Image (tube, rainbow, N blue to C red):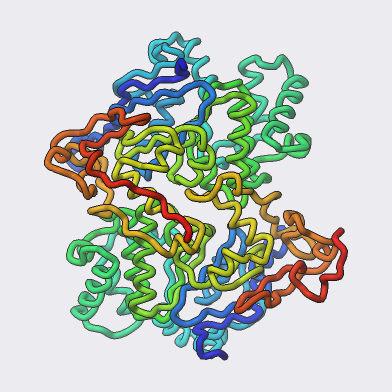
Amino acid sequence: MNEQHLLEIRDLTIEFALRSGVIRAVDRVSLDIPKGRVTALVGESGSGKSTLASAILNIVSSPGIIKGGSIAFNGSDILKYKANQMQKYRWTDVSMVFQAAQNTLNPVMRIGEQMTETVLSHKKMSREEIVKKASRLLDYVRLEPDRVLKAYPHELSGGMKQRVMIAFSLLLDPQLVIFDEPTTALDVITQDYIFDILQKINREMGITMLLLSHDIAVVARVADRVGVMYAGKLVEIGDTFEIFENPKHPYTAGLIKAAPSLLDDIGKTKSIAGSPPNLLKLPTGCAFHPRCESAKDICRKVAPDLIAVGDGHTAACHLHDPFRKGEKPA
Amino acid sequence: MSSLLELRNVSMIFEQKSGMFGQARTIPALTDVNLEIHPGEIIALVGESGCGKTTLGKVITGLYKATSGELLFYGKNIWSLSKAGFGEYRHSVQLVQQDSYAALNPMRTIFQSLSAPILENKLVKNRKEALDKVSQLLEIVELSPPEQFLEKYPHQLSGGQRQRVLMARAISLNPKLIVADEPVSMVDVSLRLSILNLMASLNRKLGIAFIYITHDLATARYIAQNGRLAVMYLGKIVEQGNMAEVLSNPRHPYLQALLTAVPIPNPRIAKAKRELPLKSLEMPSLLNPPTGCAFHPRCLYASRKCEEEAPPLAPCGNRVIACHHEERVPVWKLASAK
């Protein structure tokens, strides 16, 4: 256990048994979440990032099962927690803002009542104190507390509801907050100030964050560290600048090149060949090989492990494995 | 250049009759929109949710009849065309929507979905000819070999492939214009570019004009790099002109704010974020739109005049802008990497 790591995930594997076969949504993923920093996981739909995040709260939904691995929070494996420990851990230690969370508010309860209920289900606190705390947090996310506490969800815009959800996630002073696509379905301007708010929370309150996103441009702005997932595996992780300026996995490099920017030369933008894999019929060897321009014979046969490719930078790609450099391209 | 399509003072007002005491509420989704579309060009229509861009797409494709104003196709008002003439218009102007799953009948194979319109409109005589034509269409949208797709159902295809099928259907009746409403926002990120490239190649090879409707300025710039950009805010076009020119020197304060908010996939630029040039973060409601210039409550440069009087869309160099105080608005430049 490294003191700098709030969360250490080791060899986590999550499977879904479907009628059509078994899907390995998360495949032996090991990931450290450093204290006080913003870690982002990038991946397309089906890459396993949301399933991984649900495991951190131990709420993997049926028919998903955690087949193996450990998740240590401050050194203790939360997968071994008893029900009462789990109840304390969720929301008090780690909270989450789910995708399209705006729609998870109860439509027939005022925001203030919902916030009070959330606090009381986890700990004892006077209503006065709760209102004080909720007001402070709402103010922090740039909402008018007096108005919002009395409002019903339908009286608020999508961006306001998302800020309410952020305030919710902070109610019990968690150490880690997970944000799953926090700005999907929100406008660009709304997205921009929501990320301003998240950065402020991280810097001023020192809260550790895990951000899940499909959008590499968003990640460039907020994350200190970036992990890239493909077909259930973590294929590359490193410091944000390192990942963008010196990507080692061809998929990471492809994602960066495939993101249209307002600034770059349009001719440099390039799409990734092929389509995302079918998890029921994963390619042999490296799951990315059918889409990879540099694929060699070994890539079709052997799945690569994560290896160090730089300072705090690892990638799962045979092209960077020094012991395999002698291999001839196919 | 003569225009393919011309919108003259097009307004669309929706009426909502519910309400607790049965009072009618009106929603001005479009107000006095003027836009000219030339044959074979690409226009990106950009705005945030609720700005009226989807409504405008539906008006252009003839799915909505505008409350007022004219829609001229080769100079003829489409709302005074004969039934046959209007039918022809609907063939010439096609709509591709965001949700490719909803746009295809889940019980029909790709061949059935693609052959129905060409058989119905007698572009082909029989099933045999239909098969040839559909195969050809699938080749054009790069779903090859076609035999692999003909007998598939929509759920057996990926989002990107379904979007290609929609493009094939849109071009099957030899249209002059395709209105593509957020065609890539539900497609996996690694495939988005390839769909945009397909649209660009249909434009180049078949000479079809495109209106690309989106909230995403980066993809708008990508596809309409040599075309035009029209920016909408609360039912109005606020700035319109050549894409490269407008982006190198955006003049409307709303467009400057929007551009500031676009995430840039480069951490050196993205992390050196600038403040949004806005007075208020909240988007006003269309149910109760602001007086005068709809942007004035959020605008840093607004005056009394902006509260009282809506600015007309007026020429300014090569482009048109709706702003009373264009001269007050500072020059705005995209950040560059150090």
Q: Nearer the viewer, residue A106 or B244?
A: B244
**Residue that appears at 72% across and 22% down:** B130
Q: Quadrant of residue A63?
A: bottom right
Q: Residue at x 67, y 71 (%)?
A: A315
In the image, A192 versus A17, the foreground residue is: A192
For residue A321, side relative to residue A76 (left or right): right
Residue B66 % position (x, y): 34, 24
- Quarter of image, res A176: bottom left
Residue A198, image x and y in percent? Answer: 38, 68
Q: Report the front residue among A194 and A96.
A: A194
Number of marks: 0
Q: Position of residue B141 (x, y in %)?
A: 67, 34
Residue in view at x 26 percent, y 41 percent: B286
- The answer to whether A138 is drawn above or below residue A156 in the figure is below
- Residue A207, compared with residue A187, is above or below; it is below
- The residue shown at (68%, 67%) is A24
